[in-house]
Image (spheres, helix red, strand yellow):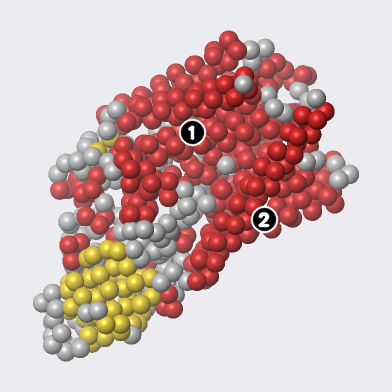
Amino acid sequence: MKKHIQNIGIVGLFAIISYLYVWSFVRTGIIYVSSDRIFHLERLEEAYRTLKSGHLLSYISTYSAARIGIATGQGYPSINLIIYGLIRLILVKPVVSYYSYIMVEQFLGLIVAFYAGWVFFKGSKKSALIFAVILRTSTYVMYNDFGRADIGEAWALIFVPLALIGYYLIVARKEYIKGTLILSLGLSLEIYSHILTVVITILFLFIVYILHLLSDRKNIIVEIKALIMSAILFILESLIILIPLIDLLREHMATPGSLLWDHYDYSPLKLIQLSLTNAIGMDSENIGIVLLLLTFMSVCFWRKLTINMKKIYVTSVILLLFVTNIFPWILLQHTPLKVIQFPWRFLAIGIVLLSVCAVVTLNNMHFLKIGSIVLIIIPSLIVMIGSEQNFITSEKSMYHVARSDEDIASPWDKLIDFDNYDEMLSMNQKTDKNTYFTYYDYSKKNAKENLESIFNHEVSIGSYRKGISNKDIESGYQEVTYKLREFPSDSGRLTLPFVIYDKNNYKVYLNSKEVEFYENKYSQLQIYKNKNLQNIDVKVKYMVPMKYKIASTVSLVVVGMCILLLLYIRYKNRGILYVRQ
């Protein structure tokens, strides 16, 4: 009974922390300016309207991204956005739904971190609790939620501890089956939200394992078998993401731009300064004052650390230096590693390792008693709320709420509230020229050459060219209908502002009749218009390939089987423990 009360208490505490995490923002009713906000708000709207139409996933953008058919859903995983869709269907209000979604993210993050800590610290709930709180209130987590508003990366961070503890079980604990299952699940849950996070995690684990083999090769065969099995399970669990992504890459996709690393100015001093101020605003990548101080304090207890803990501490400190410009990143500018864009993204791994070291340090300081736990949690929450208040104050001093038509047309650096939220969405913009959505990511490379015209919704036939307004475009699930009125009577190929990827996956209808269609050199949709046809409706519909549906089913089944196997292992171990007692 006592055990169940403890668990309920921990879950309750996590719920309170999650509420406090967004409380400062909810009470203002504003979504603040951040580097990736507009892009991800569009993705959230796509997810909400997709779910509202009775579907779970979308592969091309027909409710968002100016509704030109960009394959955002193929290039950027959106499984985590289903949760937002459900929240929005219930709460309706977009700003409240947005912060409720972040609250759910934080709650799940605390639960997953607690589980990973519980496994690592061999059943110590006190240690696991402190680990979860320190990790999830660190500024790097907050920075991704608020300073960047990168909901993909923020959700992927939830599962990094799961992947790391899976690897640790295989290599350090020799719990091969359990470790294999947890590692594969951790990686697949990462990729369901953000591809680069899983790339970084795999790269880190690969390097760490190579270094491990230099000192310990006694169990190399069984370890490699377990890691290969994890890789196979991960691939099967991730087919839902990988199959559409591979198809997209074949279409010569315009990938997100990479940073010029010869201008990378993230110095160790900048890392320390930002951490000391616990900054979470734009361009404020850091670990926070709590982790920074505990990292320095860990040196005082070096002799008390086990061999494994010394390895973890050294690795975490090296990672901190690795993400700065002390490391010669410019030498890797033209290597495949440039895909990570920002070297500080390795902090996703670093904060997990540093949080483990922080708990061990606090334990050596005898801070893991009940009273001392309170003295750790409360200051962490105070620092967290203080950082949020500073962020809000700074944003309000620099930006204003979008009210005028000019503000709505260019909302990147404007505050968004309930009154202007719908107006600033690309599907509701009233301007003739596009200034509200300028992300070229995931379009085709040849379409990128003409994206200004496409984003401005220009249609053309012969020498005639005209921009159509949003009111002349109707959206549906994976389909867009263009209502063209009083068009020239000339016959010829009509070019529409819609990007085509694989022609086999589309159908086009002219006045409700299916017609043949073409692509121009910019991969834009074209149809043949007969003479004297002046009032027409053109519908383009994306047909989800059967292989995507099969891949989704396989992934769902394999994930379900892995979870059931973990539950069985847990049940079996509890039975063995009960018999021994």
Q: Mark 2 is on which residue type?
A: Leu
Tell whether 113 sits left or right of 256. Answer: right
Q: Secondary structure at mark 2?
A: helix
Q: Earlier in the sequence, mark 2 or mark 1?
A: 1
Task: Classify the position of the N terminus by image quarter.
Answer: top right
Camera-nearest residue between 548 and 406: 548
Above or below 193: residue 117: above
Residue at numbered disc 2 = 233
Q: Residue furthest right?
A: 218
Tell whether 349 sits left or right of 574. Answer: left
The spot of residue 36 in percent (x, y) is 38, 46
Residue at numbered disc 1 = 107
State the residue at coordinates (44%, 69%): 544
Q: Residues within 10 Å of mark 2 (few under 14, many from 20)?
A: many
Q: Mark 1 is on which residue type?
A: Phe
State the residue at coordinates (32%, 68%): 479
In the picture, the disc for residue 411 is none
Tell whether 299 sits left or right of 464. Answer: right
The spot of residue 427 in percent (x, y) is 25, 57
State the residue at coordinates (60%, 52%): 560
